Image (tube, helix red, strand yellow):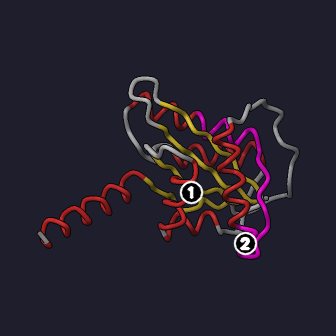
Amino acid sequence: MTKQISHITLFITLLLTLLSCTNDALNKSTSSGPTPEVNVEYNYTPEELEVIDLINEYRTSIGLNTLKTINYVSVKSEEHNNYMISNNVVSHDNFVARSEDIIKTLDVIKVSENIAYNYKTPQAAVDAWLASPKHKKNITGDYTNFGISITKNPINGRNYYTNIFVKY
């Protein structure tokens, strides 16, 4: 019985590790300072607004600044969710290209990303990120802004989360 519980615990740990991942920050070597946000529309869902609030509440609870959303970064997050759904993967594929695009377009100096898959609630996804040292590092990192997208796979109904952090 104890061996079976150990196997179940190991399986759950591996599953959480695989379904909630992070990517290290990509840094720009120099910056000429902040540029105005690219004017794009993004309509945040109640679930996305909840992630925004949860992350900012956590940051302020430990003495950090709140992060402001940038619609362009949320659009890039949504594009990545759509890529993962279309390719039936959970990955950071094309992170470098995504980061370089954000750096070039917004003139930010640092970009990082958290992704998650199959969490039913924003609270569950944020809790998983905070339980993971690499994800938590992004949430508590030296950032000024972020974007979020939660996209439901129309075939299986599972949620894909991409949360991109940037610093001016």
> In the picture shown, does residue 149 fall above or below 66?
above
Q: Nearer the viewer, residue 18 or 125?
A: 125
Would you name the residue on which mark 2 appears? Answer: 61
Would you name the residue on which mark 1 appears? Answer: 126
Q: Quadrant of the C terminus?
A: bottom right
45 sits to left or right of 15? right
What residue span does the magenta drawing correspond to?
A: 59-78
> In the picture shown, does residue 121 fall above or below 34?
above
Which residue ends up furthest to the top in the rendered image? 155
* Amino acid on which the number 1 mark rests in the picture: Val
x then y, percent, for residue 7: 18, 64
Q: Nearer the viewer, residue 123 or 117?
A: 123
x then y, percent, for residue 66: 78, 62
80 sits to left or right of 101? left
Which residue ends up furthest to the bottom in the rendered image? 63
Q: Is residue 76 magenta?
A: yes
* Amino acid on which the number 2 mark rests in the picture: Ser
Q: Nearer the viewer, residue 109 or 50?
A: 50
Q: Earlier in the sequence, mark 2 or mark 1?
A: 2
Which residue lies at the image location 46% right of the left edge and 29% below the top edge?
153
Q: Quadrant of the N terminus?
A: bottom left
Disc 2 is placed on an element classified as: helix
Q: Is residue 37 magenta?
A: no
Report, in whole angstroms, how far the alpha carbon at label 2 lies from the one at label 1. 15 Å
Label 1 crowd bin: few (<14), some (14–19), many (20+), radius 10 Å: many
Label 2 crowd bin: few (<14), some (14–19), many (20+), radius 10 Å: few
Which residue lies at the image location 51% right of the left edge and 53% below the top edge?
124
